[in-house]
Amino acid sequence: MSLLSAQELRKTFGPQTILDGVSFSIEAGERVGLVGINGSGKSTLARMLGGLELPDTGLIVTRRDASIAYLSQDPQFAAGLTAREIVLSGLKLWSAAKEKHDQASDALSRGEGDVDTWLSIQSTAGADVDRLGGWDMAHRAESMLDHLGIARHDARVETMSGGERRRVALASILVSRPDLAILDEPTNHLDIDTVEWLERYLVEEHKGALLLITHDRYVLDRAVTRTLEIDRGRVFSYEGGYEEYLESKMERLEQADRAEQNRQNFLRRELDWLRRQPKARTGKQKARIDRAVSARDAPKLTHEGRVRLTVESSRTGKTLLDTRDLQLDIAGRTLVRDFTMSLVKGERIGIVGPNGAGKTTLLRALIGTLQPTAGEIQIGQNTEIAYFDQARSGLDDKQSIYENVSEGKMRVTVNGFTMDTRSWLERFLFDPSKQTQPVGALSGGERARVALAKLLLKPANLIVLDEPTNDLDVATLSSLEELLVEMDGTALVVTHDRYFLDRVATAILAFEGDGRVVKYQGNYTTYRALRDAAAAEKAALTSAVSKSKGASKAPPANNEGSSAKKKSALTYGERLELESLPSNIETTDVNIRKLEEKLADPATYTNVTLDVQALVKELEQKRNEAARLLTRWEELETKKEQSDS
């Protein structure tokens, strides 16, 4: 029997059919991704499987002993509970067994009641604690909170932000180790390092089955073994992660296109035959006519809609945006210090760093809505900024989609082309019937699409996006990526989506602690390689210095001076090696600088003949070689000094 089986599920909201006869199953230990455009019914289906919502018709069957945990996008907790208490409350069986063991141990220590009874209870409860995870579960719960960025374990839930509450809920589910974890957008509000930790945890440590709804394509590709897609009320199943899903879906659509083309060809042949026949027809001819009518009335192939994004561009002046010695302090804490940058036309800069590091604060200062503590920010006279904030503000929840975007205008102009406002909204997958819905009734992803539709009407040459990937579906993210790559403008983007940064970014601004913001040329993968190589070089140099200091303080091997000198004297080959090392180190440093300059040149990333990853790998090898040569020089120099003393 499957762990969970969905049979002919149907769900409608008013005139809209969300799920239309959906059937599938999830096996024990299986890892399933669930994808589809915003509003297609992913969260609705997840809530049904989690037992929080009922289908109109259909059946969901779960294995009798199966435990299922559901992470919603907006988890609710009783007031007064701390993060630690919430996570431990997810361990109901373990907590009950631990409480029984503690109760029995307490009674035995006080000498109360029947000793044999309490010993039996203590033994049984102790065995249950071992079976359900062991005695360090409380420590594991706290470790899980730490990994997910919840530093204040005793903080009460009502004092937390929405993102913090989601992370507490996620920690509770992961610690409880359910047979099936249903996670609805678990990467939202996580920084990149935490997303990468979660990805590793799901792949390496989570033993139960998984149903994962996420826009993070790297997580989908690495953490799931099967992908389900909701498309116009139906569910299609594909083996593998995101890349295999794309390949299989393309094959399915191509096959459907061929089938539709065959249907059209058949209809043309049959119509031609019918027109050439006399009025009197035989029974066999009647059957042929019936086949033609059936083919004519068969459902026509329709492809899912795709968001089409464009932006009203404006002329860029000589200065776009510059900073000099910028410092930003919030509540006595320095988030950014000594930050100098000149933004170049065409750059697309991704901004990364831990939650709370100051990424949004930096954006607000750069666009002029926050006064810096020190330093200068110069915004060019012709710089036009379009700002997409995390809250998707600027929308009136009581007004309809059409009213929010049109602002009373029946027609809009984009890049010199004038069109009906309703046609503009259809580009964002809002058909005329949908456009009358109030914004307050939309899903998070649909609301984000409305905000984009409104934002992109404003002429701009600098687009500033704060966590644009939260809530947006994969198809819309792909369209946004294409817009940013193809537009004649510049972008600053705060995001934790590594796939997005790898496709879009020409440089990365990384918050590296103590107010330091460092710029790396290249996309996210290049940044990680450069950062890791720099860390490895620093570690090698630190190790070399430590060895050098240890060698200089080390006592002689024996008390006979002449013997010690003899043992530490350089050989002829070592003397030749020492003489050549400075030149080799200098040559290696020159090669490193050349590679760094090439990787710092934006033209490198537009030249299709260059292998950027090979350049990064070569730079890492050169840095390791420089560290090795320096370590060897220090060893031989120390040995020479000892032999000369």
Image (spheres, grey):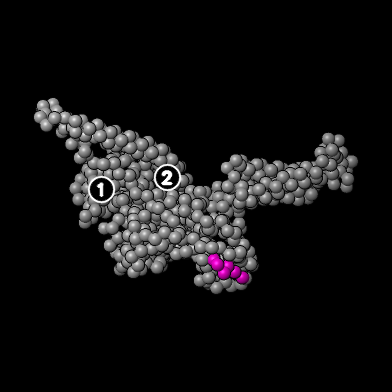
x then y, percent, for residue 110: 37, 58
Q: Tag 2 or tag 1, which sits nearer the N-term?
A: 1
Q: In this view, does 237 lie to the left or right of 205?
A: left
Q: Give the range drawn in magenta.
A: 376-383
Q: Disc 1 versus disc 2: distance between alpha carbons?
A: 23 Å
Per the image, is 379 magenta? yes
In the picture of the structure, the residue carrying the numbered disc 2 is 220
Residue under the point 19% across and 33% down? 275
How many labels, in total? 2
Residue under the point 45% across and 42% down? 222
**Could you say which disc has been placed on residue 19 in the image?**
1
Q: In this view, does 347 lie to the left or right of 13?
A: right
Task: Decide which of 298, 245 is in the foreground and name it.
Answer: 298
Q: Is residue 376 above or below residue 250?
A: below
Can you see residue 179? no
**Could you say which disc has been placed on residue 234 in the image?**
none
Task: Tell me where residue 320 sits by quadrant.
Answer: bottom right
x then y, percent, for residue 470: 42, 56
Can you see residue 262? yes
Residue under the point 63% across and 64% down? 340
- The crowd level at tag 1 (other Cα within 10 Å; few <14, some 14-19, many 20+) is many
**SS category of the residue bearing label 1:** strand
- Amino acid tagged 1: Leu
Residue under the point 51% across and 52% down? 485
Looking at the image, is mark 1 or mark 2 nearer the viewer? 1
- Amino acid tagged 2: Leu
